[in-house]
Image (tube, grey):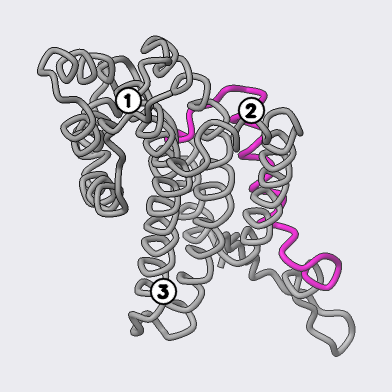
Amino acid sequence: MAENTDLTKLSKKDLMKMYIYSQAFVSGFNYEKQEVPGFAFSMMPVIEKVYKNEEDKKEAYRRHTELFLTEARLSHFVIGVTAAMEERNANEHDIDPVSINAIKAALMGPLAGIGDSLYHGTLRPIIAGLAVSMVIASGYTSMVGPLLFVLVMAGVGQLLRYFGIFKGYEKGVEFVGAMQSSGLIDKMTRLAGIAAYAVIGGFVYKFVTINVPWTYKAGETVVSLQSTLDGIVPGILPLLYTLLMLWLMDKKKMNPVILMLVTMLVGIAGYAVGILG
């Protein structure tokens, strides 16, 4: 059986070109097709190389104008997988082109769950909280906190983009199939959600401040109500107020913006009458 010498394979240079093109992934985001412009733009190096016929190129571009939306950084794994499938389709013609979009659609949900939970729900609040704490500790004079936030978030984002494309192309659909069959995706999403709630809850005491300046005398001793409450449970008032806001939004379906305005008015009025410090 003669070996097919007309195969067009993607090189590391081509994948790197995809990585560079993908930096504009979210720049074309719109409410009609979501991330489609960025996805189609990222696929240009692949389509232009593997397809020789102009009609095949047009069909490939048309194929990637269907709705696409997942977490922007993990979307690059889909780009890598799609590149492998387009290469195979162009060389072997043994892939139904419809299945390419089917795979893309199947990956959108799981990757969105992982990306939103780990990147936005866990990493971002942790690094943001650390950065804000550093700013506060410096008396609002240091830029180390903001720089740390930018470097960590951008650095992790670029690593996800790079390895997503290269590993997605290398492993193809086998990797995601193994993750789904093992239940790893569901486990990672659930554990990431738990971690995110724990981290965000831990920052309540740091960033929600309620000070009650009331004092009373017990013999010769002046007792501070705030110190007494903190002695029972540190930050109990911020915690209770945060839980109240959560209950009003979740159970009473109150508008968060209205609750923010009410909080501001309560703070101003409470300070004016001496209830709050």
Q: Amino acid at mark 3?
A: Leu
226, 76: nearer the viewer = 76
- Give the left or right position of residue 53, taking residue 171 as reference: left
Q: Are marks 3 and 1 in contact (CB under 8 Å)?
A: no
- The label shown at residue 250 is 2
Q: Secondary structure at mark 2?
A: helix
Distance Cα–Cα, label 3 vs label 1 = 46 Å
Q: How far across and down, in percent of the image, does residue 123 sit?
A: 54, 57
Q: Amino acid at mark 2?
A: Asp
- Give the left or right position of residue 213, taking residue 103 as reference: right
User: Magenta span: helix, strand or loop, mainly?
Assistant: helix
268, 138: nearer the viewer = 138
- Crowding at dot 3, Cα within 10 Å, few <14 / some 14-19 / many 20+, comes out as some
Disc 3 versus disc 1: nearer the observer: 1
Distance Cα–Cα, label 2 vs label 3 = 34 Å
Q: Amino acid at mark 1?
A: Asn
Q: Which residue is mark 3?
A: 148
242, 161: nearer the viewer = 161
Q: Which residues are magenta?
A: 230-258
